[in-house]
């Protein structure tokens, strides 16, 4: 019996929730939560940047079905064949850390533009509600603080981060154009820094970087003088907000910031990790990367008003959970993930 038929009552049509990028860090947490809510989840991912082992936590669920595919290409028949039954589409399909999205900038841009267009057309055909996960990077290095959704940003369209920044801005344009033309019911979430278990240790984001260096017994690398600020939201809070946004009836077509309003410097994050690990922390300084934002904090007034949401996980509590997970992964012997046959197929790529 396949995952397409398990648990499906005869004669009753059960809808699917499509999660593009569902094997990734936030995507895998979202898939798990949706399954726990009783939804049937169709996970689409090319596994280009995802930890394939994230799927180990999902594939035992009767309502879960994984499809390997790249949204820059025509959608696989395992997805298009379910068009009439798709009720919700979450688009999380893009590398989200600078090192990973800059490694293949053309693919990053095409994932955001061509891939989002393909998924919006699927939403139009199926009548599904569509949620785009955009990013705080659309604000660039902001000169307005904190950043409200009506701030138009300070973004370089030619810099090394533009493939992601401008790609997400273009994806938002597509989503709202579909909405204005009555072609799809859309939601747009602008996600600020999210952290937690199931991150790649080499993904280049500051929390995973620091924890990886602690576990390796290395000094922590601070880019610049450590005075730049970020706001860190624990992954379970982010997922809660995404589901609320998907299900909310919004009073207007608008992006919604999803993040934590508690702002701290990178130097303060180092101190917090020292508290969590109980170990003295050494640091080394490197040059600040090009176009790296100096300040970042969301205005979450819309999320409070429209979704009744704000993050509830304190930073130290979230860091403890995250550090414990990374420590257990570090201590575990290498193993071969339990994978479905589709996960052994060669990755499909347009490049």
Image (cartoon, rainbow, N blue to C red):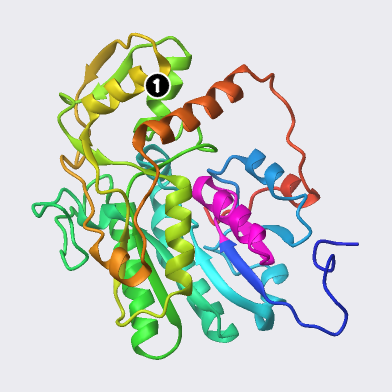
Q: Nearer the viewer, residue 327 or 156?
A: 327
Q: Identify which residue is drawn at 18% across, 62% down.
A: 148
Please provide percent x and percent y for residue 223: 23, 26
Compared across the picture, whether 140 is left or right of 109 comes to left
Q: Above or below — where is 291 with respect to 244?
A: above
Residue numbers of the magenta segment: 20-44
Q: Identify which residue is drawn at 66% across, 59% down.
A: 35
Say which residue label 1 marks: 276
Compared across the picture, whether 142 is left or right of 197 comes to left
Q: Above or below — where is 145 with respect to 333?
A: below
Q: Is residue 307 magenta?
A: no
Please provide percent x and percent y for residue 161: 28, 47
Q: Is residue 24 magenta?
A: yes
Please provide percent x and percent y for residue 330: 58, 20
Compared across the picture, whether 27 is left or right of 223 comes to right
Please provide percent x and percent y for residue 245: 42, 68
Where's the N terminus, which quadrant?
Answer: bottom right
């Amino acid at each position: 019996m396949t995952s397409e038929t398990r648990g499906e009552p005869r004669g009753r049509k059960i809808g699917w929730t499509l999660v593009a990028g569902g094997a990734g860090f936030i995507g895998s947490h979202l898939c798990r939560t949706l399954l726990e809510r009783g939804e049937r989840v169709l996970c689409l991912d090319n596994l280009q940047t995802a930890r394939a082992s994230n799927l180990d936590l999902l594939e035992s669920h009767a309502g879960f079905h994984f499809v390997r595919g790249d949204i820059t290409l025509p959608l696989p028949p395992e997805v298009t064949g379910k068009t009439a039954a798709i009720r919700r589409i979450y688009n999380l399909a893009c590398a989200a850390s600078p090192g990973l999205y800059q490694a293949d900038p053309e693919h990053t841009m095409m994932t955001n533009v061509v891939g989002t267009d393909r998924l919006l057309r699927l939403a139009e055909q199926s009548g599904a509600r569509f949620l785009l996960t955009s990013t705080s990077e659309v604000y660039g290095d902001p000169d307005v603080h904190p950043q409200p959704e009506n701030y138009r940003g300070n973004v370089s369209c030619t810099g090394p981060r533009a493939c992601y920044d401008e790609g997400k801005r273009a994806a938002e344009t597509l989503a709202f154009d579909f909405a204005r033309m009555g072609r799809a019911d859309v939601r747009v979430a602008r996600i600020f820094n999210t952290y937690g278990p199931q991150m790649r240790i080499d993904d280049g984001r500051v929390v995973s970087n620091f924890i990886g260096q602690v576990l390796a017994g290395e000094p922590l690398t601070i880019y610049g003088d450590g005075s730049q600020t970020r706001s860190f939201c624990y992954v379970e809070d982010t997922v809660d907000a995404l589901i609320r946004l998907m299900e909310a009836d919004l009073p207007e077509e608008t992006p919604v910031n999803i993040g934590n309003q508690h702002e701290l410097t990178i130097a303060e994050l180092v101190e917090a990790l020292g508290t969590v690990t109980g170990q003295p922390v050494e640091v080394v300084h490197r040059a600040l990367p090009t176009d790296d934002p100096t300040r970042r904090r969301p205005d979450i007034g819309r999320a409070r008003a429209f979704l009744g949401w704000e993050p509830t996980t304190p930073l130290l509590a979230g860091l403890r959970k995250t550090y414990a997970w990374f420590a257990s992964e570090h201590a575990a012997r290498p193993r071969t993930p339990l994978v479905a046959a589709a996960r052994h197929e060669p990755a499909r790529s347009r490049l």
